[in-house]
């Protein structure tokens, strides 16, 4: 076959590591691809391989001051959002991950690890479950056979699962449990603040004996959402449902009279801190989306100017 289908297992600076039927190689950079992508491999000109249509895509605004878009993973069916029953647990961060999953049309499941080191896990499970009625949350011991037993309904033939979360929460340990061995290096967390050390340094696709693909990822210190308006609305569906009931169409949900959202807060139907998190996330997403749109516009204008100069030079 001149262009066999292959899947991107790793992205390196010098190329893409792809797997397929009889294919296991590093191809030069060229295709705008990420881990989990399917390609039609051009064996004569690998850099010109074609990226196939994605069923899902995780993306974020790149960390730092760079305004570019960063692809995280493609073609994921289920994402396990991993957090610990300690200082790492953060509802606002979990909401970001869930919004990104909803936007990508991927099923999110929140996994609570290190329950054996916690006196009472119920508050953590309840807080995670309250994020969305569409999200299942469960505690799991990352060591031993428990991950295989509890996660088997999602880890089936033809499925792709991904683990996302902070460093030190047990993502790689969970991958190793599913793989049945030490396939991924793991490390301990710091005792003083429960923060983990980066043991996974890049996104990598592994394959279980049953054919399920498993994506392990480094811990994310920063998750800036972009192009995730629908995902945020799905997480905060109780707030989103009230927007159209405000007296003014351009209501900022701050001091305007007749604001349905502020009235719901006053009645105790929506917690003030939940409204504050929604307001912050919506503002951030709008800014990031506008910034990325501006960057794309600037890029198009630059390319147009370059073409005009080249055309004049030829004349």
Image (cartoon, rainbow, N blue to C red):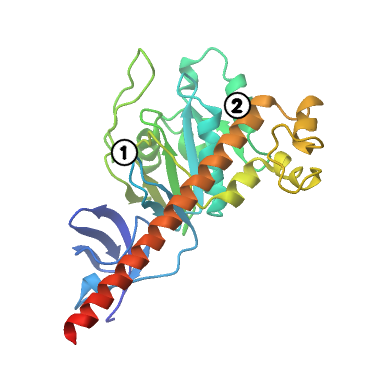
Residue most extreme to the bottom: 315
Residue in front for this viewpoint, 201 or 230:
230
Task: Classify residue 262 by image quadrant.
Answer: top right
Task: Classify residue 49 by image quadrant.
Answer: bottom left
Q: Is residue 148 above or below residue 78?
A: above
Decide if residue 218 is on the left or right side of residue 146: left
Give the x, y percent position of residue 165. 43, 35
Q: Quadrant of the C terminus?
A: bottom left
* Residue underneath mark 2: 125
Q: Is residue 79 visible?
A: yes
Q: Residues within 10 Å of mark 1 (few under 14, many from 20)?
A: few
Give the x, y percent position of residue 254. 69, 33
Decide if residue 298 is on the left or right side of residue 267: left
SS state under label 2:
helix
* Residue underneath mark 1: 181
Q: Quick one: label 2 or label 1, which is nearer the N terminus?
A: 2
Decide if residue 147 is on the left or right side of residue 273: left
Q: Residues within 10 Å of mark 2 (few under 14, many from 20)?
A: some
Decide if residue 150 is on the left or right side of residue 218: right
Residue in front for this viewpoint, 143 or 297:
297
SS state under label 1:
loop
Give the x, y percent position of residue 242. 77, 42
**Residue mark closest to the camera, 2 vs 1:** 2
Q: Quadrant of the N terminus?
A: bottom left
The residue located at (57%, 15%) in the rendering is 120
The residue located at (17%, 85%) in the rendering is 314
Q: Is residue 103 above or below residue 189?
A: below
The residue located at (19%, 64%) in the rendering is 28
The residue located at (74%, 44%) in the rendering is 243
Give the x, y percent position of residue 134. 66, 43
Q: CA distance from mark 2 to mark 1?
A: 28 Å
């Amino acid at each position: 076959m001149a262009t066999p289908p292959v899947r991107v297992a790793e992205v390196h600076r010098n190329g893409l590591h792809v797997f397929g039927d009889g294919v296991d190689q590093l191809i030069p950079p060229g295709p705008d691809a990420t881990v989990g992508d399917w390609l039609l491999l051009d064996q004569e000109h690998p850099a010109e391989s074609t990226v196939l249509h994605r069923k899902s895509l995780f993306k974020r605004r790149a960390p730092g001051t760079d305004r570019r878009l960063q692809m995280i993973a493609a073609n994921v069916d289920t994402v396990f959002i991993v957090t610990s029953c300690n200082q790492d647990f953060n509802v606002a961060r979990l909401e970001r991950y869930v919004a990104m999953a909803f936007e990508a049309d991927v099923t999110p499941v929140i996994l609570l690890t290190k329950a054996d080191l916690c006196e009472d896990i119920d508050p953590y499970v309840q807080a995670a479950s309250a994020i969305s009625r569409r999200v299942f949350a469960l505690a799991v011991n990352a060591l031993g056979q428990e991950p295989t037993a509890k996660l088997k309904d999602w880890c089936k033939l033809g499925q792709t699962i991904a683990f996302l979360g902070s460093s030190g929460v047990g993502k790689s340990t969970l991958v190793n449990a599913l793989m049945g061995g030490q396939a991924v290096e793991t490390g301990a967390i710091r005792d003083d603040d429960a923060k983990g050390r980066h043991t996974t340094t890049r996104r990598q696709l592994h394959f279980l004996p049953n054919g399920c693909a498993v994506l392990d990822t480094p811990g994310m210190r920063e998750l800036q959402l972009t192009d995730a308006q629908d995902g945020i609305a799905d997480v905060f569906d109780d707030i989103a449902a009230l927007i159209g009931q405000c007296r003014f169409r351009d209501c900022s949900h701050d001091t305007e009279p007749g604001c349905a959202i502020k009235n719901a807060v006053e009645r105790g139907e929506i917690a003030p801190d939940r409204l504050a998190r929604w307001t912050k996330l919506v503002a951030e997403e709008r800014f990031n989306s506008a910034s990325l749109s501006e960057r794309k516009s600037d890029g198009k204008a630059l390319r147009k100017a370059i073409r005009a100069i080249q055309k004049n030079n030829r004349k």
